[in-house]
Image: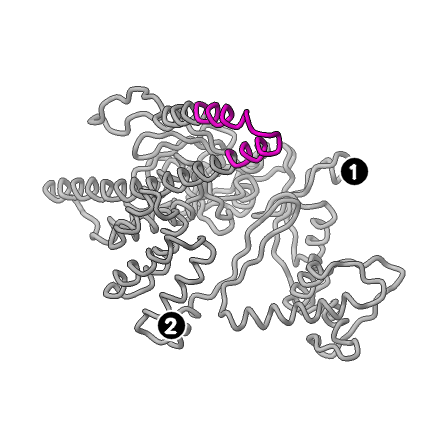
Amino acid sequence: MEEAGRAAVPAFDALPPRLPAPDEIDIEWQLLDDVIDEWRRGEATDAAGLPADARREALLDLHVTEIAALTAQLERVSARRASLIADAHRESAAIEEERAAVREREGLRVDPPRRRAELVRRSLTAEIACATRATEATVARWIGEAEALADGLGATLAAALEGRISYLHARTIADEAGSLPAAHRADFEAEALRVAATTTPGRFRRRARILRERMHPDSIEARAADASAGRHVRVEPDRDGMAWLTAHLPAATAARIDARLTDTAGHLRALDGEERTVAQLRVDVLADLLLAAGQGIAGEAASQPGAEGPAHNGATSARDESAPARATSGAPSARRGIRPQVSVTVPARRLLGHGDEPAMLDGYGPIPIDDALELAGAAGSLRRLLTDPDSGAVISVGRDRYTVPPDLRAWLRVRDGTCRFPGCDRRADASEIDHTLDWAAGGATAHDNLAHLCARHHHLKHEAGWRVVQRGGGVLDWRSPLGREYTTEPIEALSVARQREPEPEPDPPF
């Protein structure tokens, strides 16, 4: 997805027209550059009379000094951003309360305070994310840190603004203090600030965690049990057909898993002809264990004398020494009991043996054509969805019915790829299909009036003043409550297929 920010326009008639203003940050940087240039010239003049070696050391020291000064300025800028975010959140909440009071006086329905606060936070998160081109998860973290620092950790925010500690130190204090009961935060903050003043951010995080542990009134056993309830696994797509698999789990379990992977990989690495690195073997062992392969590399390690690797229902395998070593973690079709439901788009030219375009795995992006065919071979069923005008898929049922038919739903999922809100990367198959122009307002159930929106952004569209129109070709133009405009494009520029007349199957609009 690509987003293009446009010039902001007023969202409400009451707002005064915005005048172009000089970029204050650019002005400050220009002033800083002027000061630095003058300082450099003075230092260079002073060093000119020194011997060559000493002169070079003096200039190197100048570079290091400037790097340290700029780093300190960047940390202060981050703290300034946190302060502004806290102010923006308070202002957003005040605006919503004023609007709620007006609606109440006019006898209109008013959402409960908790719901209003949730929508304010969501809309502000989206507003900042769109303006900064950051992810909403990142902005949500910024807002959380800003709230924590502005509410009860004023001394920490002041120290970061003044440059006495880095913003990384301040974030660590906010993270650790946020999990302490309110009565213990002031003591924690005072002691943490004392330590932070003379400690690097990495070492400070370890010391702050110990300090928080010492000050927490609840036992580690009770807190560990509560924290374990939040364990989860997350998959994040990456480039070149790869992905990150991250698990948040109890530390003791993680340590045991890490030791098992290292131990099994070590046994495999010692085998004759094994060319994979220990790092590669650890990944392959992990995948083999999770997918329970009958003929996997972990089973091979278990078959070696003295190995304590995991067994696979008693099955082991022998390596074909004539074949190159290869990982089995990326071959779902070889896994017992795995019947993946996948959506893979293969360009028609590749099917005809032309071109080198990659296949597209739904929700992940480009993958090698061989991997796509292997995934397709493991699927229980296939749906052909050609990306050319000869597909014959239904791309509109007009006003005949509200429900999106299966072939149009599949077409939209491949076209959109993700939620179509600016900056959102939530997969389309985990999102809802929204009528851009509401069905109740006359919108059609057609490809040019439908788009995927995750539940969060679906609510923002209908309840928080975000507006969207379809330009054509799957392109969406968005307008935020503040009047900022953004454009999102589909992941796949699918051609509009030839329609066939649908049978009338009227459904109620709900």
Residue 282, placed above or below residue 306? above
Which is the main secondary structure of the residues drawn in magenta? helix
- The secondary structure type at the circle numbered 1 is loop
Q: Which residues are magenta?
A: 37-62
Looking at the picture, tell me which residue is in the foreground, 492 or 203: 203
What numbered label is drawn on residue 499? none
Residue 121 point in image, percent of width and height = 30, 47
Residue 124, placed above or below residue 496? below
Residue 340, placed above or below residue 503? below
| Residue depicted at 40% across the width and 27% down the height | 32
Looking at the picture, tell me which residue is in the foreground, 444 or 126: 126
Residue 154, placed above or below residue 126? below
Residue 455 point in image, percent of width and height = 40, 49
| Residue depicted at 13% across the width and 40% down the height | 102
Crowding at dot 2, Cα within 10 Å, few <14 / some 14-19 / many 20+, comes out as few
Q: Report whether 343 appears left or right of 37.
A: right
> Which corner quadrant of the image does residue 225 belong to?
bottom left
**Kind of residue at badge 2:** Arg
Crowding at dot 1, Cα within 10 Å, few <14 / some 14-19 / many 20+, comes out as few
| Residue depicted at 20% across the width and 39% down the height | 95
Give the labeled residue for mark 2.
Answer: 223
- The secondary structure type at the circle numbered 2 is helix
Residue 33 point in image, percent of width and height = 43, 25
What numbered label is drawn on residue 353? 1
